[in-house]
Amino acid sequence: MKTTYFEKAYSFDEANRLKIVNNMGPVSVSQSETDQLIIVANFGVKSDEEEQDFEDYFKLVNKSGDITIDLDELDDSFDRGKMSVLKIEIMIPKLSKLKLEGENYPFSVNGVEADIEMVMENGPAVFSNCTGKMHLESENGPIKIHNLKGDLKVVMENGPLSTDGLSGDSLKIESENGAIKMRSSAFREVEVRNENGVIYYESLPVEDARMNFENENGVISLILPEMWGFEITAESEMGVIKNKLGVPYEKQDDSYILKTGENPAIIKIKTENGVIKLAYDRHLNLDYLRSKLDQLKVALAGAKGLEDREDIRKLVENLITYLNKGLDAIPEEKIKEAIQQAIAKLKELAESPNLADAKEKLSIRVEAIGVDLQNAYQEFSKSFQEKVNAESIKGFKDKIMGSGFAHVVDPELGDKITEKVFKTIRKVAPGVFDLRAAEKENIAEQSRLKILEMLESGKITAEDAERLLKAIGKE
């Protein structure tokens, strides 16, 4: 087999919308660093004597800024087996809209700033770090979305949906037979409907939120932030309601009503045959803390009279209460110490005799509190990562030492010589390290970075991180 590389850049007087129709293979889409559209492809040809022009297998048409790329199915001269190297990358210029269509091959979209539409039959799709509205339709393929800023609508038949770190004004999900799992979500208008799969929704605090969850035959789990007002109407025809919020309920006909806090989020939950689970997220969320500290700074900047002073004191008290509740969930002493110092500074701020006159100084102090907390999390995350990396390397070497090749691996030889020995072993006994290990390592590494990112932002504790890293084999 001969491996061939193709790369070509295309320039347009204007580029507004791009449509990609994929019948070729795995496609990754990212934002171009220039105003050009760049297509890169790696592909294998079965015969070393075979010459193929990759441009013969796709069509690019531009009509007044509306661009279409048709990726045709490759013929038998291309290698399409399990070890195929086929990979297509498309780097796009700044656009208003991106549309994706496909049947069986995966899409991966990263860092795109545009409204995105997708129609997929059977292939998986992954979206990361995108900004703009999304409208996704899939029949049988799974969809994963990480870190989206924009409204989202998803219509699915049989595949699962998993998301993390999404925010926008509107969320609408319709599914027939797949699980819906959404973590760290912040939408004001939420509509989630499923027929035969789990609904798991973890919400961040959102003002004036209106949420509606419906399921026929699956569990609905709703995880809410503490220090957030809500009014929940829960109804289950054949199932039960498990309430771990510590909020008493009142019965009205076939519904259970739970109310707490001021300016409540209005939440309606209904299931026919599944359990409804209600619980709090007990972890401190650094993103939420930043938003509340920013809110406090704005209030300080506009403070004038006694009424403003009372509003500021109330904000401070709420922050202190939130920080105190989160202390129990944090075993790391360095972060605990930073939080305790933040609480002391906030108490001092609340007791200031004249908030209006000292508001500039106090605003700087609030900024310093946020920096201190951020630094504490980052410092712990860095030391934790160094520990994980050291243990990972040691565990890998220990595993090799314990194998049947221990007699050729001398730890006194040093890392460079040891690595040469490993390479030799791979050549004479390739099965020892598993030829597909590189692919698994790449996936595990992406998961490891995400876990460490969640640890740094305060979404999980060190114990959670260790458990997750162990699960992916990266402890």
Image: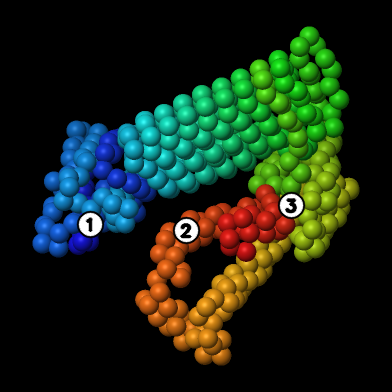
Asked which secondary structure carries label 2, the reply is: helix
Q: Residue at x 83, y 57 (%)?
A: 340
Which residue is tagged 2?
440
Q: Residue at x 61, y 20 (%)?
A: 216
Asked which secondary structure carries label 1, the reply is: strand
User: Callout 2, which amino acid?
Assistant: Lys
Q: Report whether residue 274 is seen.
A: yes
Between 46 and 315, the residue placed more toward the observer is 46
Q: Are marks 2 and 1 in contact (CB under 8 Å)?
A: no
* Numbered label attached to residue 109: none
User: Callout 1, which amino acid?
Assistant: Gly
Disc on the earlier residue, 3 or 2: 3
Which residue is tagged 1?
44
Q: Quadrant of the C terminus?
A: bottom right
Q: Nearer the viewer, mark 1 or mark 3?
A: 1
Q: Nearer the viewer, mark 3 or mark 2?
A: 2
Q: CA distance from mark 3 to mark 2?
A: 44 Å
Q: Residue at x 56, y 90 (%)?
A: 412
